[in-house]
Image (tube, rainbow, N blue to C red):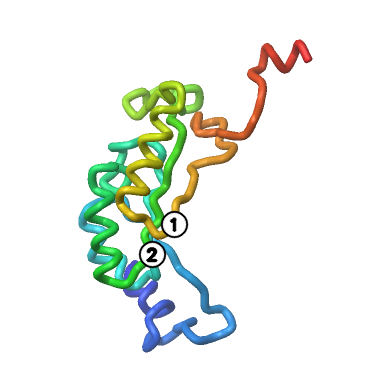
Amino acid sequence: PLSEWAQLLQPAGAYSVRNTDVDGVFIGLWLEERHSDSLHVFDGFYTYFAATGFSYGSSLYNWKAMAGWAREHDKVFIASVGPGYDDTKIRPWNVHNKRARDNGRYYEAMWRAAIEAEATIVSITSYNEWGEGTQIEPALDGLEAQKE
């Protein structure tokens, strides 16, 4: 719960790590619009999901407002971008969240939105998440690999 995070992350918290050897940069996940109420205890937030529209935080049209909230509250805004999303091989019921790569245009649109929102940091979801179809690491598909 938020109250427990506050005990750790607020300087006056009962178990505060602030200004100790274990202090750090603590990042929350902004999923739903109402989460802005609980993000104040963290140093910033990220959006994680590579499927635009999956959540409030992963919806590109919300990123400028989220970045504005971050600036107002002196927080780090980490926009998460991905090349597409397709986890239907492991979650066949999730076809409604599939996002085609569109020859790189999907990835470019996410990067453009992150830049236009003036995100503090951009994270990539993900380098090698083959199960969700977000991998960007160089590879051959199964048939090509067998030929090699």
Q: Residue at x 34, y 73 (%)?
A: 41
SS type, badge 1: strand
Work out which quarter of the rendered image holds the N terminus and state it.
bottom left
- Mark 1, residue position: 121
Residue at screen point 39% across, 86% down: 11
- Residue placed most toward the observer, 67 or 14: 67
**Residue at image mark 2:** 76
Identify the residue at image location x=36%, y=59%.
77
* Image location of residue 138, percent across then percent down: 64, 30
Q: Residue furthest right?
A: 148
Vertical position of residue 29 compared to residue 44: above or below: above
Taking depth in this image into account, of 124 and 31 the one nearest to the observer is: 124
Rendered position, 18 above or below 121: below
Whichever of labels 1 and 2 marks the residue nearer the N terminus, that label is 2
User: Which percent across, then down, holds residue 72?
Assistant: 24, 69
> Residue 143 vs residue 39: left or right?
right
